[in-house]
Amino acid sequence: MSSLSYPTPLYAHAGRGRFEDVYEPAEDSFLFIDALERDADELQGLSPSVCLEVGSGSGVVSAFLASVVGSSAFYLCTDVNSLAANCTATTATCNNVALQPVITDLVGGSGIEAAWAGGRRGREVIDRFLPMVTQLLSDQGLFYLVTIVENCPEEIIRLLGEGGLTAGPCLSRRAHNERLSVLRFHRTPPSTAVAS
Ligand SMILES: C[S@@+](CC[C@H](N)C(=O)[O-])C[C@H]1O[C@@H](n2cnc3c(N)ncnc32)[C@H](O)[C@@H]1O
């Protein structure tokens, strides 16, 4: 764990006023931020050139990552909600970081080195995204995924394992009636990959 602590980005504009219909940072967002803070040293060492957040909402998670990793990376933040893209841009300005919001379904592009996604509504979005992760994640990249128990995280770990990704340390917390987890994956080194 990093000995430095990083401030939570400013996000008071999210979930109210013109951004009323944007997801306001909640327990899942903060657990995600905690996982990134836990891995801060490793993420800095990785020195990613492209970071991608699918479903950025307010942009608070990417703003936090940008404050940890720094301005050498390009931060792509996708969301289907155009207001979320505007909110992410506002969050970037408020926190003096550069984020690139894109209004799109899931993601386009390639060569990502760190990626993460959040979802609280079943597996519909997650299941469409998982096959893309195994294609897009760079060799040294990390993929973070927020899940609840109902998403069957063990099954996600198995599915991504079949795609050549290994699950790393997980961070879990109970929030109200939900068991939230942030899963973390990296590419399975060729020498330890099991032939299928
Ligand atoms: C639960 S919010 C999480 C927001 C942010 N990641 C956070 O942790 O605070 C999920 C976000 O994903 C977006 N979303 C849902 N389906 C999507 C899709 N198919 N492609 C991109 N974004 C999507 C929603 O509009 C919403 O902003």
Image (cartoon, rainbow, N blue to C red):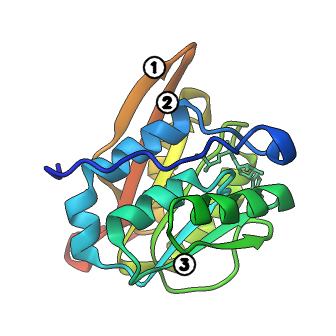
- Left or right: where 169 falls relative to 172: left
Q: Is residue 52 positioned above or below 64 on the image? A: below
Q: Which amino acid is tagged 3? A: Gln
Q: Label 2, on which residue? A: 180
Residue 91: image x %, image y %? Answer: 62, 58
* Residue at 31 percent of width and 67 percent of height: 194
Question: CB under 8 Å between callouts 3 and 1?
Answer: no
Label 1: few (<14), some (14–19) or many (≥20) C-alpha neighbours in 10 Å: few
From the viewer's side, name the closer residue of 121 and 69: 69
Work out how far the residue at label 3 is from the one at label 1, CA to CA, in angstroms. 32 Å
For residue 39, which quarter of the picture? Answer: bottom left
Q: Label 1, on which residue? A: 174
- Of mark 1 and mark 2, the one earlier in the sequence is 1
* Marker disc for residue 137: none
Total numbered labels placed on residues in the image: 3
Question: CB under 8 Å between callouts 1 and 2?
Answer: yes
Q: Which amino acid is tagged 1? A: Arg
Q: Is residue 111 positioned above or below 7 on the image? A: below
- Of mark 3 and mark 2, the one earlier in the sequence is 3
Work out how far the residue at label 1 is from the one at label 2, CA to CA, in angstroms. 6 Å
Q: Which amino acid is tagged 2? A: Leu
Secondary structure state at the residue bearing disc 3: helix
Residue 92 visible, this angle: yes
Work out how far the residue at label 3 is from the one at label 2, CA to CA, in angstroms. 26 Å
Q: Quadrant of the C terminus?
A: bottom left
Q: Is residue 122 positioned above or below 52 on the image? A: above
* Marker disc for residue 135: 3
Instruction: Check the image and name the residue furthest to the left.
Output: 3
